[in-house]
Image (tube, helix red, strand yellow):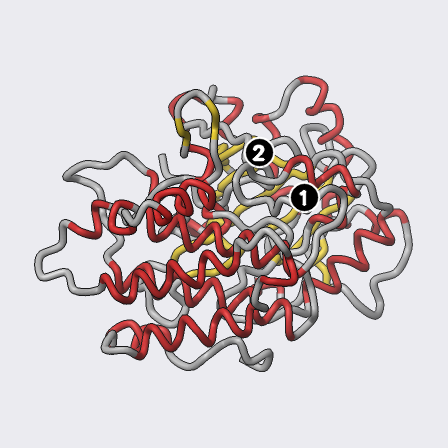
Amino acid sequence: MTVNSASFSEEEMTVGSASLSKEEKTVAGALTSKEKKKWLVFGGKGAGKSEAKKRQLTSVGKGAGTSEAKKTQLVSVGKGAGYTFDLDDLLRASAELLARGSVSTTYTVVLEEDTKVVVKRLKDVEVTLHEFKQHMEVIGNVEHRNLLPVRAYYYSQHEKLLILDYVPAGSLSDMLHGTRGSGRSLLDWDSRMRVALAAGRGLAHLHTGPHLIHGNIKASNVLLRSDLEPEAAALSEYTLYPLFGNSITSSLARGYRAPEVINRLTFKSDVYSFGVLLLELLTGKAPYQVSLGEEGIDLPRWVLSVVRQEWTAEVFDVELMRYQNFDHEEEMVQLLQIAMECVATVPDERPDMTEVVRMMEEIASQGATEVEKGVGKSSADPRS
């Protein structure tokens, strides 16, 4: 099964639809008995029709009101993608469990007329309704073709839900680390450069436009468009970390977390995580899969150890090198140099994301015309 939207933690458990009982094929049915009692609060079995009518999709902003009924609404964020469903529609819809993590559980939900959305159930949220709403308004104002927006949310004492667009092509993690074999689609070099540039431009916009920290960059949060054109990829789950307090830093994905991060995330820690992502694209290795002997070693350290022994060619993904007439080694070495700058141990030695995007665009322009055609103009510009 393809995981299209991974959870906020690296501790994921993918569950195929075949493993779910009949009851678990709906969002409400996927919960434990204790959790089901909580879901009844906002629309499980037994919810009255009069109450259901109160739970219409509404917009954040003026006129939202503060009545108890409106506090239990499914609230749209930003443009809201034009969705017309309400909370009861979500609860009745068929659902497929994609992933479980330490702070969220992710479902694909199929509504009427085959409309699909991704629903994320957040756990251990430490902010009030007012703080949650304010934060949703902030991220709802972020618009960029390489950022996957939150479309709606629900907040109650026991449940916090986020609604996101469904991206059918899956994640970069799926593509890089899925079962390798003859039936698997491979990412060639041009596609990897498009993905790197798209993700970089989305992150650069987040840093330079609204001045927000992503906080959880990893391959499973890079969602791929099917055409790999200018919108080749979109970063998801950006800027959610303030909802969980300082404890969230311990739940960040293994291998992506900057060494200096304890309780505080920064723009430079985002750059470090992006550097690890570039190394992942270049090597084909997941950060937490790399080991040396009995002692685990993170991906940046492994790459550095190989390069120091002048075995640079051994770093790159063997699947890339198998392509006939492959002549992109120089570009790969240049991208490797950028990645190693991003994962510098000292935060101040890391470039900012605008500079990272500029350097990647220079690589793309050096004879790789197909890559540059695919990615279009720079999106490091906050206005893009």
Residue 338, how many percent across, how many down?
A: 44, 63
Placement of the N terminus among the 4 image quadrants: top left
- Residue visible at 56% across and 67% down in the picture: 351
Q: Residue at x 41, y 51 (%)?
A: 279
| SS state under label 2 | loop
Which quadrant of the figure has residue 155? top right
Above or below for 299 versus 321: above
Residue to which mark 2 is pinned: 27
Identify which amino acid the numbered label 1 is placed on. Leu
Vertical comparison of 52 with 158: above or below: below
Side of 50 relative to 325 (left or right): right
* Residue located at (8% from left, 57% from top): 324
Q: Is 311 displayed left or right of 235 in the figure? A: left
Nearer mark to the viewer, of 1 and 2: 1
Q: Nearer the viewer, residue 333 or 147?
A: 333
Q: Which residue is mark 1?
A: 161
Residue placed furthest toward the right: 67
